[in-house]
Image (spheres, rainbow, N blue to C red):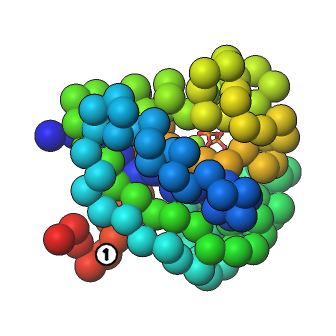
Amino acid sequence: LEQTYIMIKPDGVQRGLIGEVIKRFEAKGYYLRALKLQNVEQAHAEEHYIDLKSKPFYGGLVKYICSAPVVAMVWEGKSVVSTGRKIIGATNPLASEPGTIRGDFCIDVGRNIIHGSDSVESAKREIGLWFPEGLA
Ligand code: ATP
Ligand code: MG
């Protein structure tokens, strides 16, 4: 079954949106396969966002992810990678449709609450990075 890596970023945790995010994925019919609250080391955040290394916002993005605990999750189910991205909404919350998580809860691209893997290949890499111990 397809799996994706979903992460509630520090702003989402601090704003009390953990339950809201889990509720939406569960309501859709997806299965929560793993979950942990984690403080993120700089090197780990850099590795997660390695593809964005050349972007001007890379340094700020890494700092943001390391600023407070995140909730790291693996979700499972039919087409969960692409459908999960739809549930999350567009990267820039001003372009995210109402009804999506980003569309409903934020306005700043640098504080957009949640991450979701962008392909099945990325999901495999990210699950390996965040759950090196494997899934129970
Ligand atoms: P994510 O990977 O977090 O799920 P995404 O795939 O929608 O988001 P990416 O292009 O992978 O978008 O960018 C990763 C993250 O970098 C974004 O979620 C956002 O937090 C941040 N980011 C992207 N573009 C900008 C920008 N122009 N300014 C500041 N931060 C940005
Ligand atoms: Mg991305």
* Position in image of residue 84 (x %, y %): 43, 33
Does 127 appear above or below 63?
above
Q: Considering the image in quadrants, where does the N terminus appear? A: top left
**Residue at 67% across, 49% down:** 113
Residue at the image position 74 percent from the left and 52 percent from the top: 54
10 Å crowding of disc 1: few (<14), some (14-19), many (20+): few
- Location of ligand 2 given as a quarter of the image: top right
Q: Is residue 70 visible?
A: yes
Q: How many marks?
A: 1
Judge whether 122 appears above or below 40 on screen. Answer: above
Q: Secondary structure at mark 1?
A: loop
Quarter holding residue 41: bottom right
Between residue 10 and residue 46, name the one nearer to us: 10
Answer left or right for 90 relative to 25. right
Which residue lies under the disc numbered 1? 132
The image shows residue 64 at horizontal and vertical percentages of 76, 65
Residue 58: x and y in percent read 76, 57
Would you say 57 lies left or right of 96 here?
right
- Quarter of image, res 15: bottom right
Location of residue 96 with respect to 18 vertically, above or below = above
Is residue 12 shown left or right of residue 34? right
Any part of residue 124 in sight: no
Amino acid residing under circle 1: Pro
Please state the horizontal and vertical placement of residue 79, each as a whole percent of the image: 28, 28
